[in-house]
Image (tube, rainbow, N blue to C red):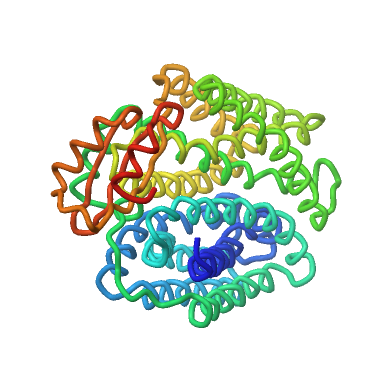
Amino acid sequence: MSPQELKSTVSLSLVFVFRMFGLFMVLPVLVLYSEDLQGATPALAGFAIGAYGLTQAALQIPFGWMSDRFGRKPVIIAGMMIFMLGSLVAAQADSIYGVIFGRILQGAGAVAGAITALLADLTREQYRTRAMAVFGISIGFSFCIAMLLGPLFAGWWGLGGLFGSNAVMAGLGILILLFMVPTPVVTRTDLNTKVSIKDVGNVVRNPEILRLMAGIFTLHFILMSLFVFLPQMLEDTMGIAREKHGWIYLTALSISFVMIVPVIIFSEAKRRLKQCFVGAVTVLLAAIAGMWQVESVLLGIFLFFAAFNFLEATLPSLVSKLSPAGTRGTSMGVYSTSQFLGAALGGSLGGLALQYWGATGVMVVCAIPTALWWLLSVTMKQPPYVSSMVMALDTSMSLDARTIGRELAIIPGVEEVTVLDSERTAYLKVDRKVVDMTALRQYGEC
């Protein structure tokens, strides 16, 4: 990776981190501090937690289309400014309805797809997977730090100050985009980041991919539902000051992350991905059961984050494995939409359950979809052990796309091939334990 590509990857990851901070920091504190807002009820507080997911789900793909037409940077800046506006609206709000409106505006800055498309414009095909991996790490990092900083910032400045810090972070993201991120000379077509409408039908008709969409929907449904009642339980029932909640979340996240990394490596190296996946969903059920009792809430939090970290890392990998070569961008677009819809519905139903049935109602709301997901995971097929690979084809070759595709397909270890002739790029699904890399490199760099 060249210095320019490294700079682009790091700076765009920072833009992403600042934006995700704003969404995640509110999660562990909104219910606690909403008690001081006019018209606040548990149901409305829960809706405020997940409200951003509605506009995220609705606008993520349109923002990607607009970035293709009007340019990446203008669309990303517009999205970040909408996010900043939403943060300021929520910061000035003295009623729960103002906070909800602010959260909806925050979600309307749905620039994740445009940012990944800009990264594709600024990196070569053979290094793009590494760049996307840095993106994934940045999301996990922002979630962990947001769990710590959210309660601290809210304790220092209140809910208005917390939302105000979101606006500052959005401003920093815009400055990084303007002064650190290079402007691409050309806009590249990358099938791993671009959503194709004609391929959406193929994605949603695939029963195995649909199981994964149901999984990410359920995972974020539970995440938002749990944070409707967990902060209150820690403060009111267990007597833990709200300013200290962040340390509990960060400790649980850190320990669970260290523990699940070997499991992730084992699941891939020993090809036991389905077994580990089912085990993680089982742990998720155990976590919900643990939170049902006051004396085991902390254990439940740890088990939840252990399962959450594994599943959050594994689900995109499974989507990549199951998506036909060259349709990963479309699959991930549907995947992200399912994720945000789960967040929106989880917060809303969790809040309603807390208002009318208390913590027990929230536990039931979380347990039912998790149990259904467990059934779906137990009955899913063993996933193929293939990896996505992007190859920059040798421009000196005179072969047409169809011929190159046929020749690549017969190389041992190559399972699927899609060739984009206009970009001189091949998208492959390969079994890395079998694939003949020497034969592949005769056609280009990978």
Residue found at x 44% / y 32%: 432
Foreground residue among 245 and 335? 335
Does 158 sit above or below residue 338? below
Counting from the top left corner in percent of width and height, residue 215 is at 46, 34
Q: Give the quadrant of residue 72.
A: bottom left
**Does any portion of residue 97 appear in the rendered image?**
no
Task: Give the residue at x 40% y 30%.
Answer: 431
Percent across and percent down for residue 427 are 30, 45
For the residue pair 15 and 164, the one nearer the viewer reads as 15
> Furthest residue to the top?
379
Using residue 221 as the reference point, say whether residue 200 is left or right of it: left
Q: Quadrant of residue 35?
A: bottom right
Residue 58 percent location from the top left of the image: 34, 57
Please give the name of the residue rendered at 37% of the width and 74% of the height, measured from the top-left corner.
184
Residue 344 locus on image (x, y percent): 47, 50
Q: Is residue 248 visible?
A: yes
